[in-house]
Amino acid sequence: MRFLFVHQNFPGQFLHLVRHLHEQGGHEIVFISEANEGALPGVRRVLYRQDRAVSPQTHPSLRELETGLIRAEAVARAAQTLKGLGYVPDIIIGHHGWGELLNLVDVYPATPILGYFEFFYHTDRNDVDFDPEFPPRSDLFANVRVKNAINLLALNLNQHGQTPTLFQKDTYPIWAHDRISLLREGANLDLCAPDPAIFRRDVMIGPHVIRPHDKLVTFVARNLEPYRGYHSFMRALPRVLAERPDVRIVLIGGDGTSYGALPPAESGSWRDHFLNEVVTDLDMDRVHFMGRVDYDLFRTTLKRSDAHVYLTYPFVASWSLREAMATGCAIVGSQTAPVEEFITDRHNGLLTPFLEPARIAQSILEILEDRSLATSLRRGARSFAEAELSLSGYLANYDALIASLVG
């Protein structure tokens, strides 16, 4: 088959699928994206560039839409060049959030499009106005409504979509549900596997030695920011460190802002903003900020974790939650809808109110102090991953969905 993938940040959500197709053999794979240093065997990359920036005169709420339309035009030009060279794909697969797929129905009207639908915004639920510490700006609701413009244009293409969780699917209007298939993303169960022996030896986490007698509490997010509960986690630490002198804390994540408001200018980053709030109550010799790390160190950290904390607003769940479950972590998760789709309280994790640091601290301490509970949660997390998050199962379902669309 001939595949055309589209995502501005190659390979986006399609890394595992592209590798899988290459390993199958017999496919031509072309990937349209903006320039970056990524490369995958068997993939021919076609680069596009936005030919202009968003106009400064554009209404602030419309800048995301204008950027999407500029991307759509650039991708369509790249696809038209491919078509002129004789490349007609059997299916087009991409992410609808960036607008890149919008004009491909004009270039390849007979080719089915399978688009990734990630999130449909609402003014009255989910992440908007969830956290009272960050009340909505006066113009937020109007901006949120406009953020769905690309979503709605994509749905109007009358093509097919997929999304990885029921929570995400349910954010979309009911009338759109029959156009969006649930395709649960998986984790590599071999790479992300429990390693019981790791607790019996010294382990290097970057420059830090974690001894067998140490209790390691871990926290992972792309960026350390409120959307992923960094503030709630930091406020839980003084009690955890005070009651357990054997605890070490490792935080993995960058200093940027992926979602929501920017930090106060004087703070520089959300990491420093909330660290400064509690730093006088922390033993900083036992709190280790790792920044962003490579995948091997990330996996080692999860494997050695005694208690792993995953918090999120009612928003898209991170890949790290799936990988933590596959690794068999004893997880303290936020009592929010995207996490509740994965974690059943006291079966494969502990669910704790996102906005209550005292409860988060109590859940961490309970896992550290109750070895029987921790063992049960680890087994439950791994069992859930084996049943629901298998990468091979995910790819088999992807194959079946593609086959149903291509015919």
Image (cartoon, rainbow, N blue to C red):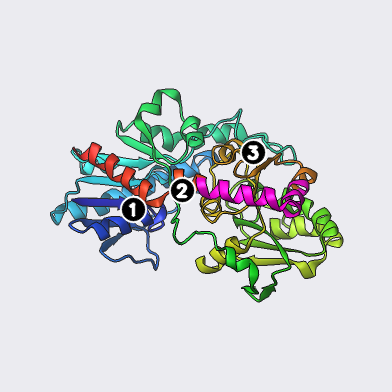
Circle 2/circle 1 CB separation < 8 Å: no
Q: Position of residue 60 (x, y in %)?
A: 55, 42
Q: Residue furthest front?
A: 372
Q: Nearer the viewer, mark 2 or mark 1?
A: 2
Residue that mark 2 sits on: 386
Q: Position of residue 374 (x, y in %)?
A: 67, 51
Local SS, label 3: loop
Residue that mark 1 sits on: 17
Residue that mark 3 sits on: 345
Q: Per the image, is 95 magenta?
A: no
Quadrant in the picture for residue 210: bottom right
Mark number displayed over residue 365: none
Image side of residue 324 versus residue 87, left or right = right
- The answer to whether residue 349 is seen in the rendering is yes
**First of labels 2, 3 by sequence position:** 3
Q: Per the image, is 381 magenta?
A: yes
Residue type at mark 2: give it: Glu
Residue type at mark 1: give it: Leu
Image side of residue 242 versus residue 116, left or right = right
Image side of residue 300 versus residue 209, left or right = left
Residue type at mark 3: give it: Asp
| Quadrant location, the C terminus | top left
